[in-house]
Amino acid sequence: MKCTLAAFALAAAIVSPALFAQSANGTGSTQASNCLPTATLDQLIKALDAAVSGPADKDRACFRDVMLPDARLMPLVKAADGSVAPRILTVDGWIDAVRKRGSQVFDERQVNVRTETWGHLAHLWSTYETRTAPDAKPEARGINSLQAVFDGQRWRVISIVWQAETPDEPVPQKYLP
């Protein structure tokens, strides 16, 4: 028993520094150099908008950088029978789904954000608008529910659940800019 515990402790001591030295984006750096900073929650929102916007087939290094590796992205989807359920995507699953649109341009902007924080965690309730180009008229809007964590240097997203506005469920006035 003592040998098993000693072997486990030795393995943990050897592996732990390597795990903490490796960043979530797999590069060993804490942030990709061409990505926007995320030291504040305002910066996180700007970085997320920049990371999701642009041609659908663009490089998603900054999207990966702003997300934790095991993050989940969950659009609420209405089925033919009227029920609503989340479609649960991984970071790679979201990238693959978006990439299918080819070079089609998508622009998302958070236009009203309410934030609650405590310690190293934050919840952002964010109204978004989407466009086909940065200067185009908004085509759709909805609400994102984002959960983020702070590692002592920057914020990263652990999950996003979102619901698009519909004629039956418009975004309430209190969440509009």
Image (tube, helix red, strand yellow):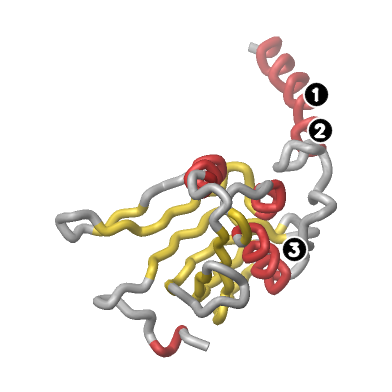
Q: Which quarter of the image is occupied by the N terminus?
A: top right
Rendered image quadrant of residue 111: bottom right
Residue 125 position, x and y percent, is: 51, 73
Residue flagged by tag 1: what amino acid is it? Ile
Q: Which mark is residue 158?
A: none
Question: Is 151 in front, or is 81?
Answer: 81
How many C-alpha atoms fall within 10 Å of the one at disc 3: few (<14), some, or many (≥20)? many
Name the residue beneath numbered marker 2. 17
What element does badge 2 sit on?
helix
Are dots 2 and 1 in contact, CB under 8 Å? yes
Taking the view exactly as shown, the residue that stands out farthest to the left is 81
Report the residue marked by disc 1: 14
Q: Note whether 111 is above or below 55 in the view shown.
A: below
Q: Residue at x 78, y 62 (%)?
A: 37
Q: CA distance from mark 1 to mark 3?
A: 31 Å
Q: Is residue 85 left or right of residue 97?
A: left
Q: Helix or strand or loop: what does disc 3 sit on?
A: loop
Q: Where's residue 28, x and y in %?
A: 82, 38
Residue 38 circle label = 3
Name the one closer to the observer, 177 or 14: 177
The numbered mark, 1 or 3, whose residue comes first in the sequence reads 1
Q: Position of residue 156 (x, y in %)?
A: 67, 56
Q: Are marks 1 and 3 in contact (CB under 8 Å)?
A: no
Mark toward the viewer: 1 or 3: 3
Is 153 on the left or on the right of 69, as rendered?
Answer: right
Q: Residue at the location (76% across, 41% down)?
A: 23
Q: Secondary structure at mark 1?
A: helix
